[in-house]
């Protein structure tokens, strides 16, 4: 017969293991909780970047720009864009800036296009420039691109059915997403485009130096998806059906050697994209931060593409 003392002796190791297991589970729980909290704060910082705004004297600035106010569906605030006129009745190029940038950082590219008689329009996305809000990395920014096209198309000095879009990362995603359903878009320059907005969140976490922490990227992606729950289930841009909608649209994909995170994704989207399409690799990414020599080479590449694929007058035919 087992005595009470013997039962106590046998229970002691069991209690020790239970205490250890409880401590480990508690540590894991608090580690996961801390990771979620840090990821949530990090995502907030990412989707609400520090804003920079550029003011210009519209009366004295070269190119005779007009300030145009326009509204975006579902957004109570208005946007202001700058319209730089080219040939009367010419095609219009809309420049869609990248994450953390603004329309003011694209003025040399504006001038290069306007010098070749294109109409050019630039504006700031939500959470950029003078605009409040948060970025969705392209989900609702595509609506902003649509609104910009709509307001420019109402002018009597442009071709209302012939637009080209240039975009960098955030702007590239929004441009391609808009082109899927807008047959006014005849040509696209997509610099460092990504497949899903969550990929840009991953890049943001990695650039903060936190990508190596366990579950940090997944937690940040989960937080971002929660903020944009209305877009859950959205297919990647490279999905076959989505890509089919831009068949016939002239496309130039640009990848930067010093931005491998986005360069690899851009290359994969290019491979899946339907014709007509072109590809270019450049040594340094982010037009706004390039030195003067790299900017001139970049501008020449972009202008040459549009001149060949979407001449200022009599634009190229495209169908969706």
Image (spheres, helix red, strand yellow):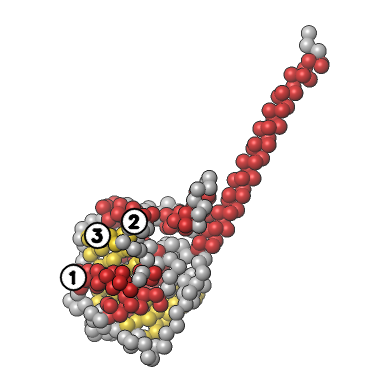
- Mark 2 lies on a secondary structure that is helix
165 displayed left or right of 37 = left
- Mark 1 lies on a secondary structure that is helix
Residue 80, quarter of picture: bottom left
> Which residue matches tag 1?
308
- Mark 2 vs mark 1, CA separation in Å: 24 Å
272 displayed left or right of 144 = left
Residue 115, quarter of picture: bottom left
Question: Which residue is found at the position 50% from the left and 48% from the top?
Answer: 212
Lower sequence index among marks 3 and 1 = 3
Q: Position of residue 204 (x, y in %)?
A: 47, 58
Q: Position of residue 165 (x, y in %)?
A: 30, 69
- Mark 3 vs mark 1, CA separation in Å: 14 Å
> Which residue matches tag 2?
263
Residue 105 has which mark? Answer: none
- Mark 3 lies on a secondary structure that is strand
Please identify the residue farthest to the top as the structure is shown.
Answer: 1
Lower sequence index among marks 2 and 1 = 2
Observer-nearest of 244 and 200:
200
> Which residue matches tag 3?
279
The N terminus, quarter of image: top right
Observer-nearest of 99 and 293:
293
Q: Position of residue 223 (x, y in %)?
A: 53, 54
Q: Position of residue 300 (x, y in %)?
A: 25, 72
Which of label 2 and label 1 is nearer to you?
A: 2
Q: Residues within 10 Å of mark 1 (few under 14, many from 20)?
A: few
Observer-nearest of 25 and 68:
25
The C terminus, quarter of image: bottom left
Q: Is residue 305 above or below residue 247?
A: below
């Amino acid at each position: 017969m087992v005595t009470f003392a013997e039962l106590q002796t046998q229970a002691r190791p069991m209690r020790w293991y239970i205490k250890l297991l409880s401590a480990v589970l508690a540590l894991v729980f608090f580690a996961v909780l801390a990771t979620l909290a840090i990821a949530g704060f990090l995502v907030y910082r990412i989707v609400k970047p520090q804003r920079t705004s550029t003011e210009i004297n519209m009366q004295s600035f070269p190119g005779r720009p007009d300030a145009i106010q326009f509204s975006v569906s579902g957004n109570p605030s208005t946007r202001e864009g700058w319209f730089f006129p080219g040939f009367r009745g010419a095609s219009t190029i809309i420049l869609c800036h990248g994450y953390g940038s603004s329309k003011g950082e694209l003025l040399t590219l504006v001038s290069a296009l306007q010098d070749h008689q294109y109409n050019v329009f630039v504006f700031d996305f939500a959470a950029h420039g003078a605009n409040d809000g948060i970025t969705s990395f392209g989900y609702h920014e595509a609506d902003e691109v649509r609104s910009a096209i709509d307001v420019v198309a109402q002018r009597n000095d442009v071709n209302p059915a012939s637009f080209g879009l240039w975009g960098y990362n955030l702007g590239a995603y929004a441009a391609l997403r808009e082109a899927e359903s807008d047959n006014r878009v005849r040509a696209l320059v997509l610099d460092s485009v990504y497949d899903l907005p969550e990929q840009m969140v991953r890049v943001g976490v990695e650039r903060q130096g936190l990508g190596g922490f366990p579950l940090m990227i997944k937690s940040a992606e989960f937080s971002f998806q929660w903020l944009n729950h209305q877009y859950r289930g959205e297919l990647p841009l490279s999905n076959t059906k989505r890509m089919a909608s831009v068949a016939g649209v002239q496309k130039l994909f640009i990848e930067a050697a010093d931005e491998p995170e986005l360069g690899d994704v851009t290359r994969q989207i290019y491979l899946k994209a339907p014709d007509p399409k072109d590809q270019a690799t450049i040594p340094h990414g982010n037009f706004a931060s390039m030195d003067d020599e790299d900017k001139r080479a970049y501008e020449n590449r972009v202008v040459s593409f549009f001149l060949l694929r979407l001449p200022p007058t009599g634009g190229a035919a495209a169908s969706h």
